[in-house]
Image (cartoon, grey):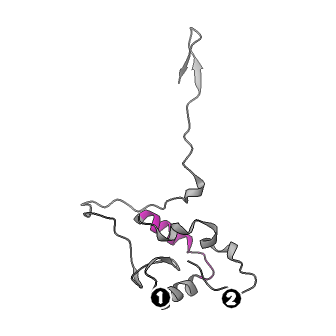
Amino acid sequence: MTATLLDEDLMPASLPCHRVDPEVFFAEAPAQVEFAKTLCVDCPVREECLSGALARREACGVWGGQLIVNGEIVARKRPRGRPRKNPLPVLPVPPPELGAPVRRVAPRVANERGARRAA
């Protein structure tokens, strides 16, 4: 998640982990964990972040694009409870600051009596 700054041009505000809520990297839902991993894909200090987290044996979280649990890399986060017979596909979740998707509403049209009704 957070890494050391090795270059003056590399400012913390330019790193993905500094542009979103830090809770994204410690999410409980598997889809949110996958989204956090995608944020790290283009990070210029991804490798340093991962190696630092492994050296510190971080307890949990997404570090350097990998999920770490008890100081070790885990391929994917399992959801709580009993596993599904037919697993659902994992889709990235947008960050919470983007808000809910916009719902489009059909335009209202007037009927022959002049009353408005939904189309």
How many marks can you see?
A: 2
Residue at the far right in the pictured view: 8
Which residue lies at the image location 59% right of the left edge and 72% below the top edge? 17
Q: Which residue position is annotated with label 2?
A: 6
Secondary structure state at the residue bearing disc 2: loop
Percent position of residue 89, x then y: 38, 61
Percent position of residue 12, x then y: 68, 76
Percent position of residue 21, x then y: 57, 65
Nearest the viewer among 85 and 24 is 24
| Residue 20 lies in the magenta stretch | no
Nearest the viewer among 52 and 109 is 52
Please identify the quarter of the rendering in which residue 80 is found.
Answer: bottom left
Q: Which disc is residue 2 wearing?
A: none
Which residue lies at the image location 60% right of the left edge and 66% below the top edge? 20
Q: Residues within 10 Å of mark 1 (few under 14, many from 20)?
A: some
Residue at the far bottom in the pictured view: 55
Which residue lies at the image location 34% right of the left edge and 59% below the top edge? 88
| Residue 32 lies in the magenta stretch | yes
Kind of residue at disc 1 = Leu
Cα separation, mark 1 vs mark 2, equals 19 Å
Kind of residue at disc 2 = Leu
Q: Residues within 10 Å of mark 2 (few under 14, many from 20)?
A: few
Give the mark, 1 or 2, whose residue is nearer the N terminus.
Answer: 2
Secondary structure state at the residue bearing disc 1: helix
* Residues in magenta, as a range: 31-45
Quadrant in which the N terminus appears: bottom right
Dominant SS type (magenta): helix
Q: Which residue position is annotated with label 1?
A: 54
